[in-house]
Image: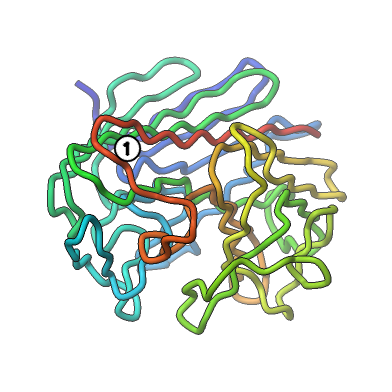
């Protein structure tokens, strides 16, 4: 048996180390070897923060928002737990980030966890079994893989909610970001998507070429970028010119939620979440996020570091 109260550590001979808390299948540390000292690039919640924190957690059953916490599937309407302004955010008030995942394997460089979600959990239909694995490989790569099966059709979108700062701390205003997306979803005052995707050309959402992440005086981001179609492919790259560190992100997902996180006045982190499009169950024109019985949901996220 494993002690679920203890964080699990995995590592490489190079000095790259990752820690995972089974509570929420949560990344709590991601350390890269440095020229002088190791550098922690994963930003946690502010000290003393008491509100629910999504920092580093696994999000499910459905990442992002579902409007009104309602959707209709196969002619039946479902009412979900509404935990943000009357909407369902990140799977409801007791989403997967709040659960004790079972550790099924722990090796030197990998961890595998499992969670069972019963029919009606937070209002979602069907019994669902989710698996999360975290694996390190050379050179300096972290691969996160989510899998899920359900015995009834259900919206499913799992993701990892890590906050990154490649400098190890301070402002990320000088970080540069590249996203392989030609379109973005506009949002309303409740951060719900509005209408069809809009072209990023000529807007502040144009990261097709590497561009600076806006500083704290800017509007910031909490937007879904509509990724170019493909299987496992490069979707984004983050770079810190001062330290020379970079992070390349690959995934098989149709969307990338980008969230810039201010901390006081420091603007200290960016969150990059490969996932289904927000509120997709209520937008038949969006890529489908419905998992059918007998099918397997898979979200692969690969983070490759250099510098």
Q: Nearer the viewer, residue 10 or 82?
A: 82
Is residue 79 left or right of 292 when viewed as pictured?
Answer: left
* Residue 93 % position (x, y): 26, 64
Residue placed furthest toward the left = 119
Q: Which residue is mark 1?
A: 22
* Residue 27 % position (x, y): 46, 41
Residue beneath the point at 24% across and 45% down: 153
Residue placed furthest toward the bottom = 189
Is residue 101 left or right of 207 when viewed as pictured?
Answer: left
CA neighbours of label 1 inside 10 A, class few (<14), some (14 to 19), many (20+): many
Is residue 23 left or right of 184 when viewed as pictured?
Answer: left
- How many numbered marks does the figure carry? 1
Is residue 216 left or right of 103 when viewed as pictured?
Answer: right
Q: Quadrant of the N terminus?
A: top left
Q: 24 above or below 306?
A: below
Residue beneath the point at 49% across and 33% down: 144
Q: Nearer the viewer, residue 188 or 307?
A: 188
Residue beneath the point at 19% across and 43% down: 152
Rendering quarter of residue 35: top right
């Amino acid at each position: 048996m494993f002690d679920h109260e203890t964080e699990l550590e995995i590592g490489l001979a190079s000095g790259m180390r990752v820690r995972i808390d089974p509570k929420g299948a949560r990344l709590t540390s991601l350390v890269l070897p440095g020229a002088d000292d190791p550098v922690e690039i994963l930003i946690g919640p502010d000290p003393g923060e008491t509100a629910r924190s999504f920092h580093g957690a696994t999000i499910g059953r459905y990442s992002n928002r579902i409007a009104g916490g309602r959707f209709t599937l196969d002619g039946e309407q479902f009412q979900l737990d509404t935990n943000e302004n009357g909407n369902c955010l990140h799977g409801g008030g007791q989403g997967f980030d709040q659960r004790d995942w079972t550790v099924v394997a722990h090796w030197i460089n990998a961890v595998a966890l499992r969670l069972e979600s019963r029919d009606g959990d937070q209002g979602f239909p069907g019994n669902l079994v989710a698996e999360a694995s975290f694996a390190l490989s050379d050179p300096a790569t972290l691969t996160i893989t989510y899998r899920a099966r359900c015995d009834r059709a259900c919206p499913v979108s799992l993701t990892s909610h890590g906050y990154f700062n490649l400098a190890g701390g301070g402002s990320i205003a000088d970080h540069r970001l590249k996203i392989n997306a030609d379109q973005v979803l506009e949002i309303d005052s409740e951060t719900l998507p509005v209408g069809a995707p809009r072209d990023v050309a000529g807007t502040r959402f144009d990261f097709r070429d590497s561009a600076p992440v806006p500083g704290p005086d800017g509007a910031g981001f909490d937007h879904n970028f509509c990724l170019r179609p493909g299987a496992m492919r490069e979707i984004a790259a983050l770079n810190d010119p001062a330290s020379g560190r970079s992070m390349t992100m690959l995934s098989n997902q149709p969307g990338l939620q980008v969230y810039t996180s201010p901390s006081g006045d420091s603007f200290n982190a960016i969150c990059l979440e490969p996932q289904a499009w927000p509120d997709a169950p209520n937008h038949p024109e969006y890529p489908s996020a419905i998992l059918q019985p007998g099918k397997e949901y898979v979200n692969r996220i690969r983070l490759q570091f250099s510098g």
